[in-house]
Image (tube, rainbow, N blue to C red):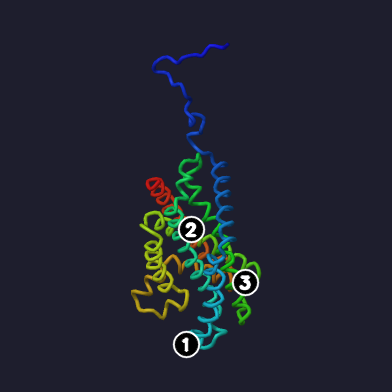
Amino acid sequence: MSSLTVPERGEMSVSDPTADLPSRVGLADTLSQTLTLAWRATMKMRRSMEVMFDVTIQPLVFTGMFAYIFGGAVAGDVDSYLPLIITGLIGQTVLTACVATGVQLRTDMDTGVFDRFKVLPIARIAPLAGPMVADLLRYFIASVLTFAVGIAIGYRPGGGVLGVAGAVLLAMLAGWSLAWIFTLFGIVGRNAQAVQGISLLVMFPLTFLSNAFVPTDTMPGPLRAFAEVNPVSLVITAIRDLANEGAVTGNVGWALLGCAVVIAVFAPLSVRAFNRKM
């Protein structure tokens, strides 16, 4: 019979289950974990198709409604208004889709989903970035549908296929960067209803006090000044340059820089707030 070894005083008789866990998560593991959680979010979309209404039904309704209601008043006729409104609606639709990112995050946190993540040896940014990567699919669908409806009612993008493809990619990047703002709202908000209210309060001024629906030179001085520095206006102007002219202008560079600045500011703030909450 084998003898049992009795641990001396001060020794641990049970090994620490976290002793072999890495103290830091490498870049490759972070990317893998982010993609895994992105796939999880994509599966949720497939099982709850109603969460896709804002990027499927809304582009169809808004494109037809805005074009035919405001086309004559703003540009004299619908055909002249389409190059302005189609590209503007892409920015508006993508920004609306960003709101759902924060609301869904708050819902998951309230239902205890993230309690499972905090005990796993995963990168802290992965539970946030994963669903946002999945949302790139939503931005893609919204942009493509808006262009498709516009073409169906008479819009002819001067930039051709490459210009439209560049505009869609820029819209997706802009949506992903702006979603970090609403992710922060989702983390610090008390509940999903509060997050939605705060997000809409931010979204509507950014959307309507921009060049999405009308040229800024028709606005009063203070509103025009705000609209011209509005980050949404910068993105929409760049999208117009790509889709309508097929030109990679300085506006595209400014839009990319703006997206990078938003990510650099709000991604760390979101991760820090998330770590405090968890």
- Tell which of 22 and 84 is nearer to you: 22
Circle 2 Cα neighbour tier, 10 Å, few/some/many (<14 / 14–19 / ≥20): many
Disc with the residue nearer the chain's start (1 vs 3): 1
Report x, y in % for residue 112. Answer: 44, 50
Mark 1–mark 3 contact, CB under 8 Å?
no
| Residue 222 located left or right of residue 48 | left
Q: What residue do we see at 58% from left, 11% from top?
A: 1
The kind of secondary structure element at disc 1 is: helix
Closer to us: mark 1 or mark 3? 1
| Residue 145 located left or right of residue 100 | right
Report x, y in % for residue 101. Answer: 48, 60
- Pointer 2 residue: 177
- Pointer 1 residue: 73
Circle 3 Cα neighbour tier, 10 Å, few/some/many (<14 / 14–19 / ≥20): some
Q: CA distance from mark 1 to mark 3?
A: 26 Å
- Quadrant for residue 221, please give it: bottom left
Q: CA distance from mark 1 to mark 2?
A: 33 Å
* Residue 159 tag number: 3
Q: Amino acid at mark 1?
A: Ala
Is 134 above or below relative to 92? above
Mark 1–mark 2 contact, CB under 8 Å?
no
Which residue ends up furthest to the front in the rendered image? Answer: 1
Q: Amino acid at mark 3?
A: Gly
The kind of secondary structure element at disc 3 is: loop
Closer to us: mark 3 or mark 2? 2
Report x, y in % for residue 29. Answer: 56, 41
Q: What residue do we see at 43% from left, 48% from top?
A: 271
Disc with the residue nearer the chain's start (1 vs 2): 1
